[in-house]
Image: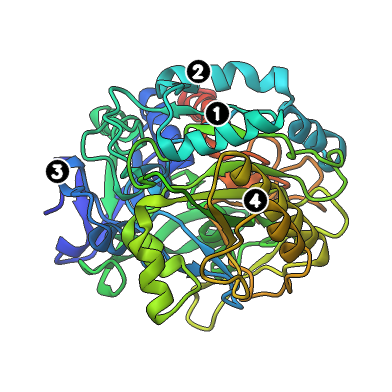
Amino acid sequence: MTASHPSVLHGDRLDQDLRLAADVVIIGTGAGGGVSAEILASAGLKVVMLEEGGYYTAKDFRMLEAEAYTRLYYDLGARKTKDKAITILQGRTVGGSTTVNWTSCFRPPAETLAHWSAVHGVEGLAEADMAPWLARMEARLAIASWPARNANNDVLHRGASKLGWHVDAIPRNVKACRNLGYCGMGCPTDAKQSMLVSTIPAALDRGAILVARARAQRLVMKNDRVAAVEAQALKANGVDPTGIRVTVEAPYVVLAAGGINTPTLLVRSGAPDPHGVLGKRTFLHPTVASVATFREPIDPFAGAPQSAYSNEFLHRDGVTGRAGYKIEQAPLHPALGAVSTWLFGREHAQVMGRLRHLSPAIALLRDGFHGESAGGTVTIAGDGSPVLEYPLTGYLWEGVRHAWLSLAEMQFAAGARSVAPAHLDVPADGYASWASAREAIASLRLEPLRAQVFSAHVMGGCAMGEEPRDAVVDSHGRHHQLANVWIVDGSTFPTSLGANPSLMIYALAARQASALAAQARGARRPGG
């Protein structure tokens, strides 16, 4: 059963076309859209939010994978790149990925912000510039270090500490967290301070309207402005259109649909792209895993999904050198574990039988800082749906091999009985020693679909920068060619971030939306 609220409309329940007028229409309700909605509504502006996913609240989150992946994720949690080589976990629900993420909130690496300024012409986003916006959102969303570690995260802490590597606690956006471990399926206690329970209710209380199950289909453009947004109402399955149209007219348009959907909407709408930069330099944090088996139970499905990390290799060869990576742990629930393993038949059953003893470590590779890491490209298929091409280059494969070696060394240092990098050629029982793992990993064939690669972070495609030849928006998110369009999500990152991006998007949205609110209020004043 979905939630009800007097200011929430559900596309699957509409029986006739809907036409709305507002000061600002926001497309997407994730980190960027949710923060923007609260700030703009609090400024006295009439806000309409369009969200492709459904509106669910705590009572709908029953910690069941079969329900969660179907309701809350794109493509049942199996969105993929064009060649199927990378699986992308991306939320599709009110609150976007903030409703289903694992609550890890990092400040952006200072090195990344400096690189954006020096190389990509971004202004006003240096570490000192962003500090007050980051602090503002940390306070708003109760973001604080989470020193308690479950057994799964203690593997990382124990192994890294033994090796003398950097290791620290992860800040999380939670209040009164019960440590249930099912963050990826929606929080059933409202402990996670996602947009679903924080900024969106605040915006609704200030007069905003939310239309859920409404897929933004086209921006209607007149000269250098967007005059209206046209959306399709969706059936309860969240996929098929009902035939009902939703149209919103507003003098300001905020695109916050994420690193795949925002450029897709612009391309589908025929938005101006005189320099051919739209949809280009789309970045993931290509992520690889290594699964350790321990004699003692780990219960990787229990407790905070992520509470320890290591930046030991984040800049292993400087900012612009070989691919660095962040090390974290990943939770492993039964269905996720069953579809993630590269094994079949009896071997698959044997691995699933020891689920309680498994501990997955992951490495999130930085991309976009080197001449051989240009990222991917978002285009559209014949039906207008998004297509992400993302070549796995030799530059990335070198980082993958180095990451597997680091993960295995760390896991053995923590006392693992065996370690298995996620690769088709690795035996079901993995490798029983660091020496054997090191030798085997050095010779693994690095090919798409042979090595398992996934990501939960999509960035770029509408890069920011002051020079229109190189960027879609300026450093405040204003579109270079469309006078009333602002983009406020991770698609504006000129590279990948090098850290879980939610806090950076929150802070960037607060900065951009505050500037937009001031502009919109000024335009409404007599003589403004």
Residue nearer the viewer, 318 or 438: 438
Tell which circle, 1 or 2, labels the residue nearer the N-terminal end: 2
Q: What residue is shown with label 4?
A: 408
Q: Which mark is residue 136?
A: 2
Q: Earlier in the sequence, mark 1 or mark 3?
A: 3
C-alpha gap between disc 1 and disc 2: 8 Å
Picture coordinates of residue 75 (x, y %)?
Answer: 39, 68
| Three-letter amino acid code at the position of disc 4 | Ala
| Residue for point 67% across, 68% down | 390
Position of residue 266 in the picture relative to residue 373 (left or right): left
Residue topped by disc 3:
59
The nearer-to-camera label among 3 and 4 is 4
Distance (Cα) linking label 3 and label 4 = 40 Å
- Mark 1 or mark 4, which has the lower sequence index? 4
Residue at the image position 61 percent from the left and 70 percent from the top: 426
CA gap, disc 1 and disc 3: 29 Å
The residue under label 1 is 507
What kind of residue is marked 1? Ala
Q: Is residue 103 above or below residue 250?
A: above
The type of residue carrying mark 2 is Arg
Asked which quadrant contains residue 91, the reply is bottom left
Crowding at dot 3, Cα within 10 Å, few <14 / some 14-19 / many 20+, comes out as: some
Q: Quadrant of the N terminus?
A: bottom left
SS at mark 1 in the image: helix
Residue 361 image point, x, y percent: 55, 48
